[in-house]
Image (cartoon, helix red, strand yellow):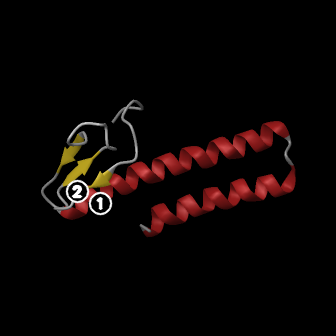
């Protein structure tokens, strides 16, 4: 996976293919094909959590660097905790 791979990813209707976003062509880019539905769901979940974790970290760093106060810190902290909970709980 590279940074250039566009998001969001999704699991196809049959559950065995991971697709990238619509790209203006008849079919979106195929990211991966797997043998078990659980694997496709795990791939998509991991990518989504990675993106959310990166966004939470960027917000946290921005707020620390710019001294945006306690409310901004709490929002960033809450976002980071939500990402971790999602990763740990799979939801």
- Residue 12, image x, y percentages: 22, 56
**Considering the numbered disc 2 on the image, is that residue within a helix, a strand or a loop?**
loop
Q: Quadrant of the C terminus?
A: bottom left
User: Which residue does the image show at 40% across and 48% down from the upper left?
Assistant: 47
> Badge 2: few (under 14), some or many (20 or more) residues near its Cα, within 10 Å?
some
Nearer-the-camera pick, 40 or 88: 40
Q: Which mark is residue 54?
A: none
> Badge 1: few (under 14), some or many (20 or more) residues near its Cα, within 10 Å?
some
Q: Give the CA distance from mark 2 to mark 1.
A: 10 Å
Q: In which quadrant of the rendered view does residue 41 lie? A: bottom left
- Residue 68, image x, y percentages: 85, 46
User: Which residue does the image show at 83% across and 38% down from the upper left?
Assistant: 66
Q: Quadrant of the N terminus?
A: top left
Q: Is residue 17 above or below residue 78?
A: above
The tally of labels here is 2
Q: In which quadrant of the rendered view does residue 59 lie? A: top right
- Residue 36, image x, y percentages: 16, 61
Q: In which quadrant of the rendered view does residue 2 lie? A: top left
User: Which residue does the image show at 30% across and 37% down from the upper left?
Assistant: 24
From this viewpoint, which residue is outermost toward the left?
Answer: 35
- Judged left or right of residue 74, residue 17 is left
Dots 2, 1 in contact, CB < 8 A: no
- Judged left or right of residue 44, residue 72 is right
Nearer-the-camera pick, 18 or 61: 18
For marks 2 and 1 on the same chain, the one whose residue lies earlier in the sequence: 2
Residue named by callout 1:
41
- Judged left or right of residue 36, residue 6 is right
Q: Closer to the camera: disc 2 or disc 1?
A: 2
- Residue 28, image x, y percentages: 25, 42
Residue named by callout 2:
12
Nearer-the-camera pick, 30 or 86: 30
**Considering the numbered disc 1 on the image, is that residue within a helix, a strand or a loop?**
helix
């Amino acid at each position: 996976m590279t940074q250039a791979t566009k998001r969001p990813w999704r699991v196809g209707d049959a559950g065995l293919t991971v697709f990238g976003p619509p790209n203006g062509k008849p079919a979106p880019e195929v990211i991966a094909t797997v043998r078990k539905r659980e694997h496709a769901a795990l791939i998509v979940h991991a990518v989504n959590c990675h993106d959310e974790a990166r966004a939470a970290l960027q917000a946290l760093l921005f707020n620390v660097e710019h001294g945006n106060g306690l409310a901004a810190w709490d929002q960033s902290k809450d976002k980071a905790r939500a990402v971790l909970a999602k990763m740990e709980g799979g939801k």
